Amino acid sequence: MAATALQIGASLHILNNGSQNFSTYAAQAKGTYVSPAKLHAVSGTPRAFAVADVNHDGAQDVVAAVDGWLWVGRGLPDGNIETVEVTAVEKGQLSAVAVGDFNGDTHPDIAFAYKALNRVSLALGDGTGKFLVFPAQFYVNKEPVQIEAVDANGDGIDDLFVRCLTGRSVSALLSKKLP
Ligand SMILES: [Ca+2]
Ligand SMILES: [Ca+2]
Ligand SMILES: [Ca+2]
C-alpha cells in the first residue's frame, strides 16, 4: 500500500496507509535509521499529512487527515512523536490537509479538503495543539486534492490555494480576520 515519508529533524516519519499507522525512525548516523520503528496507530486510513509547529514549542508536529478525524502527533525536539490528539470531523473522502493561520490570531489552524464534496473545512487551533472545527464550509472546484497555505495578499493571514482535479484548476480562498 501507499506510504508517505517525511523527514523532521533527525527522525523519519512514514505514514502507512495500508496498516493504518505512522512509524517514526530515529536517526542513528547520517543516512541510517534505527529499526524497528516506533509505531503510532492512526485509527482509520490516513489520507494526507502535513508538518508544522502547531503548539508554539519549537518542535515540528504532524497533522494527518484520517476519515472522520484529524490526528495531531505532538513532536519532541528530537523529531519523535510524543502524544496524539484527535479531533472529530465530518466523515467523507478527506483528500488533503494544510496548516496555516487562517483567522489571524497567530495560532496555527488546519485546512482539510473533502474530495467528493468539493469543499474545504477549517479546524481552528488554540495554540496548545487542540483544534475546534469551524462551522462554515468553503466550496471549491470539483475534486480538491491538494491545499497550500500562503499569504497571497500580504495581510499577515494565510490564504488557501486548492488544487482540484476537475478542470485541472486551482481555487483560491482569501482569508480575513474573524470578528
Ligand atoms: Ca510543536
Ligand atoms: Ca489561527
Ligand atoms: Ca492573506
Image: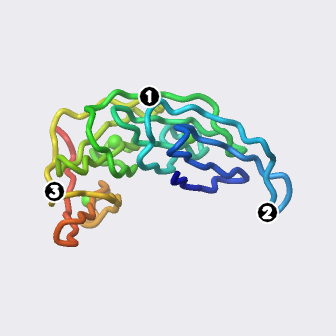
Give the CA separation, mark 1 to mark 3: 26 Å
Amino acid at circle 1 = Val
Is 78 situated left or right of 20 in this image? right
Disc 3 is placed on an element classified as: loop
- Rendered view: 101 above or below 173: above
Disc 1 is placed on an element classified as: strand
Residue that numbered label 3 is attached to: 140
Disc 2 is placed on an element classified as: loop
Residue drawn at x 23%, y 63% is 164
Asked whether the beta carbons under mark 1 and mark 3 sit within 8 Å of each other, the answer is no
Q: Nearer the viewer, residue 99 or 142?
A: 142
Asked whether the beta carbons under mark 3 and mark 2 sit within 8 Å of each other, the answer is no
Is 159 situated left or right of 82 in this image? left
Amino acid at circle 2 = Gly
Q: Position of residue 88 (x, y in %)?
A: 34, 27
Amino acid at circle 3 = Val
Mark 3 is surrounded, within 10 Å at the Cα level, by few (under 14), some (14 to 19) or many (20 or more) other residues, namely: many
Residue drawn at x 16%, y 42% is 137
N-terminal-most mark, 3 or 2: 2
Q: Which mark is residue 86?
A: 1
N-terminal-most mark, 2 or 1: 2
Residue that numbered label 2 is attached to: 31
Q: Is mark 3 within 8 Å of ligand 3?
A: no
Residue drawn at x 35%, y 60% is 148
The quarter of the rendered structure image containing the C terminus is top left
N-terminal-most mark, 1 or 3: 1
